[in-house]
């Protein structure tokens, strides 16, 4: 259960709320009548019955599941690999020769996939079971989903190292200045109303020496590939309307990606917040990119 | 973990085999250099490291995961709801006033999602914990995935009621004639080389009174909606090529859907196999359909 859209972390409460409504589908029933010739092995009840109400909100009742699906649709499933690469490339964790644990914050990370992945990586690579993680999200339902996953996987639930906090990523009111070693945001910053405010806040909460590390959709550098990607982006909301009866969510998904600054511009914004040694890596022709910066 | 494409059940071994190759992605790296200004809290190792090999085959190593993703992409996630509807509408299970358990067979059902769902439904609705299930698939890796899921969920693993069998759906060599009460196939029959042979075999293995019950992509009845769907179908393989470096799988997905007969033609084929009281229900404008028939 993973996702890519990063509609999580969105400061637009109204849009976020709309995503919490279970998907309604349109069923066009052309032939639902069923004769009972074959009912002997099923007892007295009709073999086929209509029970559409049950469908609503079943699989798609959780916000996070919907994010997962949109991530898979937009990236044809590749966001899972991008996220693995993101975690492996960062390669964070308390080194054996270090005395201090690290303090992570994963912003707009309600469902916990990046946060749990980072902690798992630290443990696996460096036997680090001391570093702490604040998982923050503006959406309480996303955080509940993350807690549920922690409970189900039997790890990081009711763990003194891990906090789930409802927080606006642009402000992070509950997070002290100069308190974090690693700030991650994965497919979330695109949905901030004021991205620069979010970057400035990232700079505020990081310790000197701390790293800002971001995964987000970006700009395709090859014009021909970009042309195809734009066609895809045009058809996606219409298909969302037909199949999922959900034009708005897919339209928002596409527009938010188109609106987001390109690699160089976003890098400048990170520098603008005060970060040094900024850089980026484009993945998959620039469909997405990893950006980073260090607070010195 | 669910899926829709039904590339499972495909009799074309070569294609099936190609799907078992982990996805390879194209990473275009524009800037991977990272200065070490921020390494104090990470010890002596470079903070960012390249470790691309690890990515390959990580999330996408299992065949079933790839099916899941393709299902989500093609149906924007709605296949989950179609499958729930499929199970609820069938409403199968040993009724309290019946003495005999039911014998189910789920064909091309390796990952177990439909089979487990049917058994769960029977237990929940009718307290049926006696009916049996044969899960058959031509692909051993899909069946392994199903067994793994059974093990993980702590249900239907090493269960005398449930068998996992490698079987070609067109023949079902290991299944006795007139032995099953319910034959289900969900997003699988489209991939049979000889669909009519599969239907004839379904008729053979069912008892008199048994039901054939099928969920599959179908034909959109509204021309305007179909036009959009066709545009989507054109862009999908190209996007598959760009993002997932996997043109062939998405191309196959689209072509196999386009090649599959429409609702009325497929109904005729079910009748041709000998079934009576045949019918269908189109879901989501005909993007997919449930078909059924009874052996009398």
Image (cartoon, coloured by chain):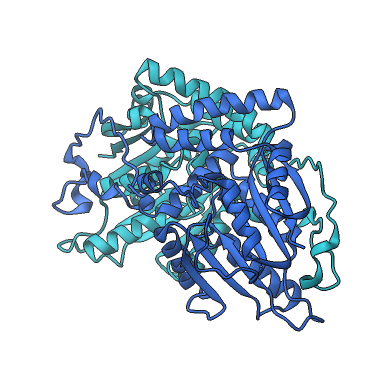
Chain colours: A blue, B cyan
Q: Can residue A69 be seen at all in this image of the molecule?
A: yes
Drawn side of residue A72 relative to residue B30, left or right: left
Q: Is residue A118 above or below residue A273?
A: below
Estimate the x, y position of residue A76 in percent, counting from the top left. Answer: 59, 40
Q: Residue furthest top?
A: B223
Instruction: Please identify the quadrant where the C terminus of chain A is shown.
Output: bottom right
Estimate the x, y position of residue A170 in percent, counting from the top left. Answer: 53, 54
Drawn side of residue B198 relative to residue A228, left or right: left
Q: Quadrant of residue B254?
A: top right
Q: Is residue B50 above or below residue B40?
A: above
- The total of numbered circles placed on residues is 0
Q: Nearer the viewer, residue B4 or B107?
A: B4
Q: Nearer the viewer, residue A189 or A90?
A: A189
Q: Nearer the viewer, residue B155 or A111?
A: A111
Q: Can residue B6 be seen at all in this image of the molecule?
A: no
Q: Nearer the viewer, residue B148 or B223?
A: B223
Q: Residue furthest bottom?
A: A99
Q: Is residue A206 above or below residue A128?
A: above
Q: Quadrant of residue B62?
A: bottom right
Residue displayed at 63% across by 62% down: A204
Estimate the x, y position of residue B33 in percent, counting from the top left. Answer: 85, 51
Q: Is residue A148 above or below residue A288?
A: below
Estimate the x, y position of residue B218 in percent, counting from the top left. Answer: 41, 28
Residue displayed at 42% across by 20% down: B226
Residue displayed at 54% across by 59% down: A109
């Amino acid at each position: 259960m993973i996702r890519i859209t990063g509609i999580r972390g969105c400061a637009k409460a109204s849009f976020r709320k709309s995503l919490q409504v279970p998907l309604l589908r349109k069923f066009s029933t052309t032939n639902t009548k069923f004769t009972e010739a074959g009912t002997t092995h099923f007892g007295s009840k009709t073999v086929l019955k209509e029970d559409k109400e049950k469908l609503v909100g079943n699989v798609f009742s959780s916000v996070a599941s919907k994010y997962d699906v949109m991530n898979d649709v937009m990236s044809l499933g590749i966001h899972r690999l991008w996220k693995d690469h993101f975690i492996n490339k960062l390669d964070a964790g308390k080194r054996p020769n270090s005395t201090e644990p690290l303090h992570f914050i994963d912003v707009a990370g309600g469902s916990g996939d990046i946060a749990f992945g980072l902690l798992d990586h630290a443990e696996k690579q460096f036997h680090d079971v001391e570093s702490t993680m604040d998982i923050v999200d503006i959406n309480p339902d996303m955080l509940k989903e993350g807690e549920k996953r922690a409970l189900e996987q039997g790890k990081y639930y009711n763990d003194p190292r891990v906090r789930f906090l409802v927080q606006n990523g642009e402000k992070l009111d509950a997070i002290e200045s100069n308190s974090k070693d690693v700030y991650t945001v994965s497919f979330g910053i695109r949905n901030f109303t004021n991205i620069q405010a979010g970057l400035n806040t990232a700079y505020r909460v990081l310790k000197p020496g701390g790293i800002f590390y971001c995964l987000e959709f970006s700009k395709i550098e090859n014009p021909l590939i970009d042309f195809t990607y734009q066609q895809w982006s045009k058809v996606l909301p219409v298909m969302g309307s037909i199949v999922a009866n959900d034009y708005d969510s897919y339209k928002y998904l596409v527009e938010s990606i188109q609106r987001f600054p390109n690699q160089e511009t976003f890098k400048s914004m990170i520098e603008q917040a005060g970060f040094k040694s900024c850089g980026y890596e484009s993945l998959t022709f620039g469909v997405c990119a990893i950006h980073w910066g260090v607070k010195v």
